[in-house]
Image: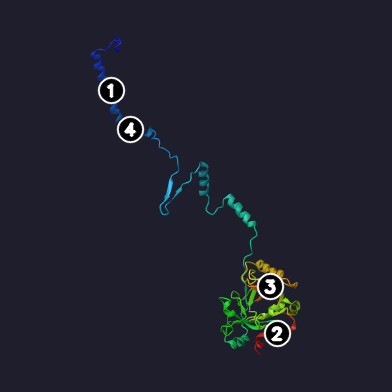
């Protein structure tokens, strides 16, 4: 006979014994199930098969606080594509260029690069003993040469101070203060080298002394009659042929001594020729050396007269009378 539950609306209700048995049966089943749930093996299985609770994702990137500066910096969001790109970059061999970098290097290689700077050749260190007499006159071993423009009053020992040009422009060869100063070699030049551009300075004195003669080169006839300059050093004798004379302000860097390349030097010589009052048809070529004489114009402020001459390499091309004066310049000085 089936035991049916009947509700209060007219259905049969179970008897007391049946209900008690049912309750005891359910209680026993509950105890068995509870005991089974506490067994360790099944707990472990549950832990392995149950998914971890979902972690709530941050919707905004974290902020990195820079405590030292008090500033904050937001860490950039990296997309999947960016992650792949970054991974590729990190797996590159150190020192290996990317494709874009290789292209950049290739383009740079095709760009004209200035020639490397070549150090000036060292001068032959054979001291010319005739300078002992010149140095002895003034008691000054700073005298490193002598300059002479044949047919003019320019005939002076040349001093050199290796730290500045002002020293000898304010002192005579005895090293005493003097308004006329001395003829001096640019402090960046050195007679120990064959510099491409050797620069000499002197005041233009109203007494017609020092480099006052340079102002006469504004006259073409004077220019044509005085085309050679003798500049001997304690190591070598040379004659230089004038290729340019011009007036300029100090914005033009004609006193440049060091050059990035031979081309740089030739560009300076070309600028000198282009500024010259006269066309001499003398070309300055690679390997040439020039001598630059500079003095104030005593006219507009910061303006200069500049006489530029190229060294005559083949001494057989020097006019005989000029060559003779070159050889005796140091010995004849002061006689």
* Label whose residue precedes the other's in the sequence (1 or 4): 1
- Judging depth in this view, the residue of 335 and 50 nearest the camera is 335
- Judging depth in this view, the residue of 186 and 25 nearest the camera is 186
| Between marks 4 and 3 in the image, the one whose residue lies nearer the viewer | 3
SS at mark 4 in the image: helix
Distance (Cα) linking label 1 and label 3: 121 Å
* Label whose residue precedes the other's in the sequence (4 or 3): 4
Q: Tell whether 151 sits left or right of 114.
A: right
| Between marks 2 and 3 in the image, the one whose residue lies nearer the viewer | 3
How does the figure colour the protein chain or chains? rainbow
Distance (Cα) linking label 2 and label 4: 117 Å
Query: On residue 247, which mark appears?
Result: 3
* Label whose residue precedes the other's in the sequence (2 or 4): 4
Q: Which residue is mark 1?
A: 29
SS at mark 3 in the image: strand
Q: Are marks 1 and 3 in contact (CB under 8 Å)?
A: no
- Judging depth in this view, the residue of 230 and 307 nearest the camera is 307
Distance (Cα) linking label 4 and label 3: 104 Å
Q: Which residue is mark 4?
A: 43
Distance (Cα) linking label 2 and label 3: 29 Å
Residue neighbourhood size for the residue with mark 3, other residues' Cα within 10 Å, grouped as few (<14), some (14–19), many (≥20): some
* Label whose residue precedes the other's in the sequence (2 or 1): 1
Residue neighbourhood size for the residue with mark 4, other residues' Cα within 10 Å, grouped as few (<14), some (14–19), many (≥20): few
Q: Which residue is mark 2?
A: 325
Residue 237: x %, y % from top left: 67, 81
* Label whose residue precedes the other's in the sequence (2 or 3): 3
Distance (Cα) linking label 2 and label 1: 136 Å
Answer whether residue 294 is visible to the viewer in this image: no
SS at mark 2 in the image: helix
Above or below: residue 50 compared with residue 63: above
Q: Tell whether 283 sits left or right of 49.
A: right
Residue 142: x %, y % from top left: 58, 82
């Amino acid at each position: 006979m089936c035991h049916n539950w009947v509700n209060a609306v007219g259905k049969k209700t179970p008897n007391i014994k049946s209900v008690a048995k049912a309750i005891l049966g359910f209680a026993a089943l509950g105890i068995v199930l509870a005991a089974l749930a506490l067994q360790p093996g099944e707990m472990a299985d549950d832990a392995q098969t149950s998914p971890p609770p979902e972690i709530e994702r941050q919707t905004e990137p974290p902020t990195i606080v820079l405590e030292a500066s008090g500033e904050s910096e937001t860490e950039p969001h990296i997309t999947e594509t960016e992650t792949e790109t970054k991974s590729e970059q990190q797996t590159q061999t150190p020192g290996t260029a990317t494709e874009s970098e290789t292209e950049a290097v290739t383009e740079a290689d095709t760009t004209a690069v200035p020639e490397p700077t070549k150090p000036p050749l060292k001068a032959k260190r054979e001291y010319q003993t005739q300078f002992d007499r010149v140095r002895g006159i003034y008691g000054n071993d700073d005298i490193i040469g002598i300059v002479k423009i044949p047919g003019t009053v320019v005939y002076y020992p040349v001093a050199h101070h290796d730290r500045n040009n002002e020293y000898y422009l304010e002192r005579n060869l005895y090293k005493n203060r003097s308004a006329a100063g001395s003829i001096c070699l640019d402090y960046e030049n050195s007679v120990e080298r064959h510099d491409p551009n050797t620069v000499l300075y002197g005041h233009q004195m109203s007494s017609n002394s020092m480099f006052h003669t340079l102002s006469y080169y504004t006259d073409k006839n004077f220019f044509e009659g005085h085309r050679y300059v003798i500049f001997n050093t304690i190591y070598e004798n040379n004659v230089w042929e004038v290729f340019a004379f011009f007036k300029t302000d100090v914005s033009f860097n004609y006193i440049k001594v060091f050059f990035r390349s031979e081309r740089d030097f030739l560009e300076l010589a070309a600028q000198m020729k282009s500024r010259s009052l006269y066309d001499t048809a003398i070309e300055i070529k690679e390997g040439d050396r020039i001598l630059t004489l500079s003095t104030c114009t005593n006219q507009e402020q910061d303006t200069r007269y500049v006489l530029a001459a190229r060294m005559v390499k083949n001494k057989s091309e020097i006019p005989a009378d000029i060559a003779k004066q070159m050889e005796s310049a140091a010995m004849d000085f002061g006689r």
